Image (cartoon, grey):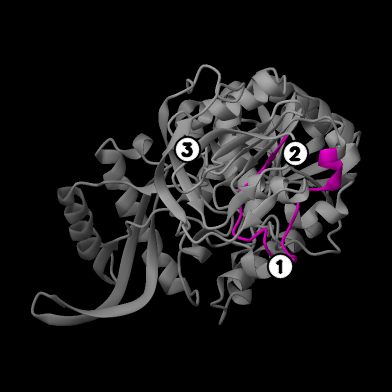
Amino acid sequence: MPDTILIIDFGSQVTQLIARRLREKSIYTEILPSSVLNTTDMAMRLADVKGVVLSGGPNSVTQTDTPRAPKEVFDSDIPLLGICYGQQTICAQLDGKVEAGNSREFGRAEIEILSQSPLFEGVWPEGSVQTVWMSHGDHVAELPEGFAVIARSQGAPYAAIADEAHSYYGVQFHPEVVHTKGGAELLVNFATHICGCHATWTMEAYKDQAIVAIREQVGDRGVICGLSGGVDSSVAAVLIHQAIGDQLTCVFVDTGLMRAGEADEVVSLFREHYKIPLVHHNASDLFLTRLVGVSDPEQKRKIIGGSFIEVFDAEAAKVKDAGFLAQGTLYPDVIESISAAGGSHVTIKSHHNVGGLPDDMALDLVEPLRMLFKDEVRALGRELGLPESFVGRHPFPGPGLAIRVPGEITDEKLEILRAADAVYLDEIRAGGLYDEIWQAFAVLLPVKTVGVMGDARSYEYVCALRAVTSTDGMTAESYPFAHEFLNRVATRMVNEVKGVNRVVYDITSKPPSTIEWE
């Protein structure tokens, strides 16, 4: 087990960035939503970590029913860093004072470094003024015993605090966002200088550990891998195959929700190239029938997830000693499927691998990528020897085109979308832009508009284009296509795709939007 930093998530939209900043420096991190703290043996959990970070969050420490850090965190000798809400709850729980602020700080702010600290070492010198990102209404009004102020701003006199004797630190700003200059280095200082973590977490080490873990979990039982042909499930399949060889059987369920020509590509790739046993089960009629009349995206995901498992249960009965189902579930899937603060009302989405699985599923789960972000999966794929042309493929969601057709799904809509998506990706590849873009796809909107084709009136669908840049999928920005490119795509799409007469481009970032439309 590598040296680990545990992040307790109080519901901040950027908690995942804390993990990313540390993992980028080969320091392993895990995120624990505060909503599950009462079901977690914290004493046992803390025995395996070097330090704890308390994230920001949308709640107010001044209210009594908001989350707090576990008592065990303070009872241990583990270094502690609180960010925004995390700083405030440290102070409140250690008999300091937090008040609802009349003067709030949102956005860029200037802080003055009042004294040197291990947190600032080599990054921010004493007496300097630094630019940070603030996002708070409440503020610390009185420090607990043993704490001193090490940085201040106009709106936050306790912008950074420290109890050096206990290795407790708190910052009102967000070091994890790029707007805080040097913020990532502060997090690394906390992990290395203060917590004593060694930067040993690499994909080579992860691969070796994962192979051992898979063998221990599976034993001599058979594993069925849910193969979609995307990067996630394929990397999972190759990794598991390296671990257990012929104990693995890959099952490709053709849901009828794939892109043009994709089913044939999957079968060819794994049967001929990887030589992994593959069962091709065409279940498109089953999936499409069950999705008739369904428009709610969460219901779509649950139907697809449940149907997927049903098919797998049927195939498992044919595989000798099959005891496990392998999936390419990633860390963002897990994080976004759990409410940090508790309650389904703040869950971003249920992933088909996470929220749609039935309680009575006959197979246990093997999820070797469950703790990895997307860029880390790509790195693991390279470590496993997968070709770059494959490792660099854009993500494709498990529910497939079902969540790229908002509203009810029909065969007609799917065929229109396949054709439109093929035109879009063809132009992206022709323009040499594919590798610059994290994910690009077309969405068929449940909207028809009037158009003119020749001398005739048309009344057809609107197609939305989405393309984003990202590192891990947790945050994303729209790709800045040239107008000429978008015009060329729109012209081809309207001319070549029967059923589309208008094309629009989605420029919204994540957050506030998600990458997929549903």
Tell me residue 401's x, y (percent).
Answer: 49, 61
Q: Are marks 2 and 1 in contact (CB under 8 Å)?
A: no
Q: Which residue is mark 1?
A: 343
> Dot 2, how many residues are within 10 Å of its Cα: few (below 14), some (14-19), or many (20+)?
few
Most frequent secondary structure within the magenta stretch = loop
Q: Nearer the viewer, residue 505 or 51?
A: 51
Region rendered in magenta:
52-74
| Residue 317 at least partly seen | no
Q: Nearer the viewer, residue 104 or 2?
A: 104
Q: Residue drawn at (51%, 43%), measured in percent from left and top?
A: 265
> Dot 3, how many residues are within 10 Å of its Cα: few (below 14), some (14-19), or many (20+)?
few
Tell me residue 345's x, y (percent).
Answer: 64, 70
Quarter-of-image position of residue 306: bottom right
Q: CA distance from mark 2 to mark 3?
A: 41 Å
> Dot 1, how many residues are within 10 Å of its Cα: few (below 14), some (14-19), or many (20+)?
few
Is 472 left, or right, of 339 in this rendering? left
Task: Point out the tag, 1 or 3, that comes first from the N-terminus.
Answer: 1
Amino acid under disc 3: Thr
Q: Nearer the viewer, mark 2 or mark 3?
A: 2
Q: Which residue is mark 2?
A: 145
Q: Residue drawn at (42%, 73%), measured in percent from left and top?
A: 412
Q: Which residue is mark 3?
A: 471
Is 469 left, or right, of 489 in this rendering? right
Secondary element type, mark 3: loop
Is residue 491 a member of the stretch shown in magenta? no
Task: Point out the tag, 2 or 3, that comes first from the N-terminus.
Answer: 2
Is residue 68 a member of the stretch shown in magenta? yes
| Residue 183 at least partly seen | yes
Q: CA distance from mark 2 to mark 1?
A: 35 Å
Q: Nearer the viewer, residue 199 or 506?
A: 199
Secondary element type, mark 2: loop
